[in-house]
Image (spheres, rainbow, N blue to C red):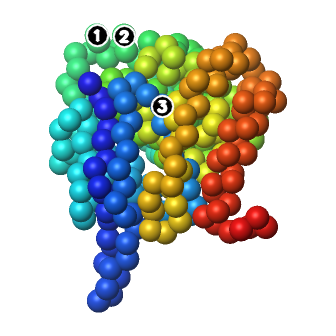
């Protein structure tokens, strides 16, 4: 089981002689092989939550658990994909994907098999000897995702992974991520500032309040996706369905209440 659980999590950051509350009493779960997106105003603690799951931050109060085990630090059961591609520029595509496998001392033959598998899954065949600078931004991010998948983590943590891409490439990558997670299910925690992206990708959406971050509401998406057959439609068709429009408006309303706006 790779369930993520936040139990009454608060996070304080020191500032001079005082402390700033980034998160306050946050509790929710991401079920095994569920895709959950987190949205909220800037500074509400979205990335801090993800870093806690990754083992890069610790809660001031409360607990973060993965698979019913408290997170004590980074581990091979969790992989992170950042907004910046974070590839090794001096390594080829194949070497980048194999990097984590070598760290885990996976046998050479198995490394070759896994690299070939994820090159095919990410539609990157023929690029294994290329260097990152020779690829488009979208292809570089596919390499980063392939590298994360190759170590076969139980949990995939994605912090604005498509934020640096142009609009067209971002749309393609969203469709690709749906395809990839269907073919290789993982527990996914995905942070985004895009309401449309959150609704399109998620099984559920966690909406955080403004600083300090609290859970404002959790919105279920999966029932609408299955009822209206989103998986069989292109993203532009999905965005025109009444269910998508309704969910997008619901999330926007919640965010507007937090960030302020004409309806506040």
Residue under label 3:
35
Mark 2 vs 3, N-terminal side: 3
Position of 140 with respect to 28 (left or right) is right
- Which image quarter is the C terminus in? bottom right
Residue 255 percent location from the top left of the image: 63, 57
| Residue 113 disc label | 2
Q: Secondary structure at mark 3?
A: strand
Q: Position of residue 153 (x, y in %)?
A: 32, 28
Residue at 30% over, 41% down: 5
Image quarter where the N terminus lies is: top left
The numbered mark at residue 139 is none
Q: Secondary structure at mark 1?
A: helix
Q: Position of residue 247 (x, y in %)?
A: 68, 38
Residue at the image point whose x is 56% and y is 56% from the top: 40
Camera-side residue: 251 or 233? Answer: 251
Residue at image mark 1? 109
| Label 3, label 1: how far apart the Cα atoms are | 32 Å
The relative height of residue 180 versus residue 145 in the rendered view (above or below) is: above
* Residue 87 shows in this picture: no
Q: Does residue 39 sit above or below 227 in this rendering? A: below
């Amino acid at each position: 089981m790779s369930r993520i659980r936040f139990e009454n999590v608060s996070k304080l950051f020191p500032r001079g002689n005082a402390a700033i509350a980034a998160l306050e009493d946050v509790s929710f779960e991401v079920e095994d092989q569920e895709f959950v997106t987190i949205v909220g105003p800037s500074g509400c603690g979205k990335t801090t939550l993800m870093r806690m799951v990754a083992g890069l931050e610790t809660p001031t109060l409360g607990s973060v658990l993965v698979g019913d085990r408290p997170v004590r630090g980074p581990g091979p059961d969790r992989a992170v994909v950042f907004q910046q591609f974070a590839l090794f520029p001096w390594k080829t595509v194949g070497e980048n994907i194999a990097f984590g496998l070598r760290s885990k001392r996976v046998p050479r033959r198995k490394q070759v098999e896994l690299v070939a598998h994820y090159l095919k899954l990410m539609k990157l065949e023929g690029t294994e000897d290329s260097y990152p600078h020779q690829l488009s931004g979208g292809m570089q991010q596919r390499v980063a995702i392939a590298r994360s998948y190759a170590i076969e983590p139980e949990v995939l943590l994605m912090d604005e992974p498509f934020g640096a891409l142009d609009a067209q490439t971002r749309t393609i990558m969203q469709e690709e991520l749906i395809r990839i997670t269907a073919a290789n299910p993982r527990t996914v925690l995905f942070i985004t500032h895009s309401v449309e992206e959150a609704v399109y990708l998620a099984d559920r959406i966690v909406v955080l309040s403004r600083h300090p971050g609290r859970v404002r509401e959790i919105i279920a998406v999966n029932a609408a996706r299955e009822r209206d057959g989103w998986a069989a439609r292109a993203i532009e068709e999905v965005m025109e369905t009444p269910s998508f429009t309704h969910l997008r408006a619901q999330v926007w309303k919640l965010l507007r209440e937090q960030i302020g706006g004409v309806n506040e």
